[in-house]
Image: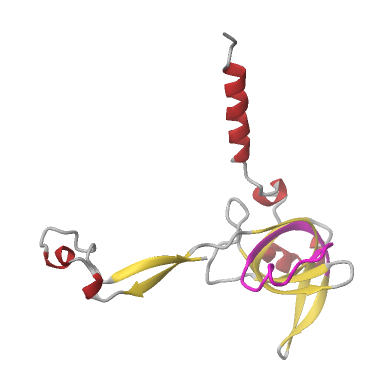
Amino acid sequence: MKNSYPHILFLFAFFLGGCASSIPKNISSTPEPDLSYEEFRTGGSQQMDKLVRWGGEIIAVENEATHSMVEILSYELGRRGRPLEQDEYQGRFIARINEFLDPEYYKKGRQLTVYGRLSREVEKDISAHTYSYPVIDVEQYYLWPEYARLERVYVSPVHFHPYHLRSPFIHPFYGHPYWYRYHY
């Protein structure tokens, strides 16, 4: 009988490799030095030509002949590079990506993290206000999967099993008239 350990080790390595993350290394790890959006705003033009890893929520995508310009509302990044959902945003920036991005897939509200070099600032109007956007020439980017969102749905007590409503021995939250369902 042949030794089957190499086959088992190969299968184990194969399945373990399938669990590896598809997040690019420059997105998931903090660059050195880590120039934040606030540091850029206080430092001004001396910060140009530096590598940054910024992210946030997509506002708009404009496709041009050779590249796409993605306007992003900047948020602080978590430890793996995903924008943190919070109330306070840091500002806006534009990511210049050298390929076509489908605006239906890269739609408003999706989270995007980019890694690249600060190249310049451009001024655009937001309503009646002129805003100065830093532009990043993107080397790598990652569109984060959407979170599953819970929706609270009221269900009439008639739909519950009668024992859930009458038993004094149930958990106080077990028979409440709300169900939750996921939306993606």
Given residues 41 and 12, the one toward you in this image is: 12
Q: Residue furthest top?
A: 1
* Left or right relative to 109: residue 99: right
* Above or below, 16 relative to 138: above
Task: Residue at 60% x, 28% y: name it.
Answer: 11
Residue at image location 72% in from the left, 49% down from the top: 26
- The quarter in which the N terminus is drawn is top right
Q: In the rendering, at what x and y percent does residue 35 appear?
A: 71, 57
Q: Is residue 107 left or right of residue 130?
A: left
Q: Is residue 80 above or below residue 61?
A: above
Q: Is residue 107 magenta?
A: yes
The stretch drawn in magenta includes residue 15: no
The residue lying toward the viewer, choosing from 48 and 66, is: 66
Where in the figure is residue 51, as x and y percent of width and height? 78, 55
The range drawn in magenta is: 96-120
Q: Position of residue 137 (x, y in %)?
A: 82, 61
Q: Residue furthest bottom?
A: 128
In which quarter of the view is residue 152 placed?
bottom left
- Above or below, 183 against 23 in this view is below
Q: Nearer the viewer, residue 176 or 115?
A: 176
Residue at (69, 53) in percent of width and height: 34
| Observer-nearest of 82 and 61 | 61
Outermost front residue: 1
- Establish if 130 lies above or below 43: below
Residue 83 relative to residue 164: left or right: right
